[in-house]
Amino acid sequence: MGKGPGAQAELRRRNFALVTHALAAGEDLTRAAVAAQVGLTRATVSTLVDELLAGGLVEERGARRPGTVGRPGTPLALADTGPAGVGAEIGVDHLAACVVDLRGTVRCRAETPAANRGRKAPDVLAELAELTARVTAAAREEDLHPVGTTVAVPGLVGHDRGAVLRAPNLGWEDVPVAAALGAGTIVENEANLGALAELWLGGHRGLADFVHVSAEIGIGAALVVEGRLFRGARGFAGELGHVPVRPDGPLCSCGATGCLETYAGEKALLRAAGLATGDDTEPGTGAGTPALRAAADAGDPRALRALDEAGAALGIALSGAVNLLDPQAVVIGGLLADLTPWLLPGVRRELATRVTDRQWRPENVVTSALGRDGVLRGAACSAVRTVLDDPASWITRNGPDSGSRA
């Protein structure tokens, strides 16, 4: 294998990425600690860090530790200025946008209620563009420079065109979202972004294989295998909401009957708990979850029964995924995270009965600490992590000698 300029450049890119990802995962690491973690020599890491400092991607924190000589004792951190990611979210009942820095910290955020089901897609996208422009302007005032935008959508995405192929809860088919929002826009399924947020920000040390379940009006899931998102052959893996749990059950928006969504989706839960308002054809509000939680807290029998039945339906659907994939854990996120005190007994009961691995334990089902914000934060982090994945290219384009700035 030759060691020409191309191979050397690739090795350099790889080493840069090892350092930035180590700093993203740790806190106040020194050069020596980074070297030990990534398996590079201290001299190599020190040279890379110097370039990252000059490029504005890394900063030194505080004074050198007592008893150390030179730079190895200086704590390092990813910079809180410079490259940033914009995340945007199209929900059935709201639009949201935020900006995160390299550390994944939310620096600017905006959200507005919006009844998007059945609404014309160009109108939704125009309003979303205004929202992202607002947070982007606020970010620039903090010396942050967005490098891209990722949009989370509740539907199937054609990644080659950045289009929403089908989003039943919005009433959308073949909507060119990326083209409408401009260059640098990536479109991704909301459940996938929620799972990535859990992987990057969820605080689950050592968790690399899991099923992430989230919900708004519908129910989505995403699979993380060996620390990577599993998309499936056509990119549509994770449609847990349309797994049949009772084939003779109610008609679902997808056209099938007895799907999980008809038992554990927001509308189904509110209806079963006696909290639904208005015509069932009206879009959900997302505000029904606090009312349902309040009813359950008060011991309302109908609400408790609805939540237990929804948990059982969720457990039935998840048992197939657990038996098929053998994940380390199931993570419950999104709006469902607020309801886990009442959902988890039913989920765990069904999993205990149906999962063939007798080593599976109730504690393998965990609640996300990110909750509803997971999707939006995952979108923004997805955009900015392009810099962490290839800091060498960013420095080349935007470093102090480049004459440009992202």
Image: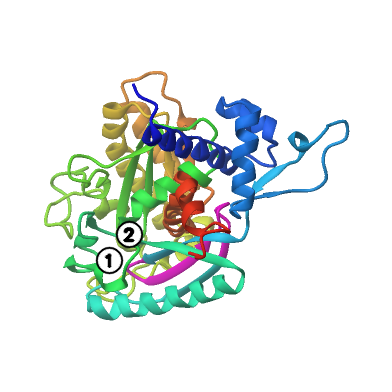
Quadrant housing the N terminus: top left
> Which tag, 1 or 2, sits closer to the chain's start?
1
In this orientation, which residue lies closer to the viewer: 221 or 286? 221
Question: Mark 1 is on which residue type?
Answer: Ala
Quarter of the figure with residue 161:
bottom left
Disc 2 on helix, strand or loop?
Answer: strand
In this orientation, which residue lies closer to the viewer: 290 or 173? 173
Q: Which residue is mark 2?
A: 186
Q: Is residue 142 above or below residue 348?
A: below
State the residue at coordinates (34%, 33%). 350
Q: Residue furthest right?
A: 66
In this orientation, which residue lies closer to the viewer: 107 or 120? 107
Magenta-drawn segment: 90-107
Magenta segment includes 95: yes
Q: Which residue is mark 1?
A: 178
Give the percent coordinates (x, y) of residue 334. Answer: 43, 54
Residue 119 visible to the viewer: no
Q: Rounded to the nearest whole Å, what is the CA distance between mark 1 and mark 2? A: 6 Å
State the residue at coordinates (27%, 39%). 317
Image mark for residue 301: none
Q: Are marks 1 and 2 in contact (CB under 8 Å)?
A: yes
Give the percent coordinates (x, y) of residue 324. Answer: 26, 28
State the residue at coordinates (23%, 56%). 157
Give the percent coordinates (x, y) of residue 389. Answer: 45, 44
Disc 1 on helix, strand or loop?
Answer: helix
Question: Mark 2 is on which residue type?
Answer: Ile
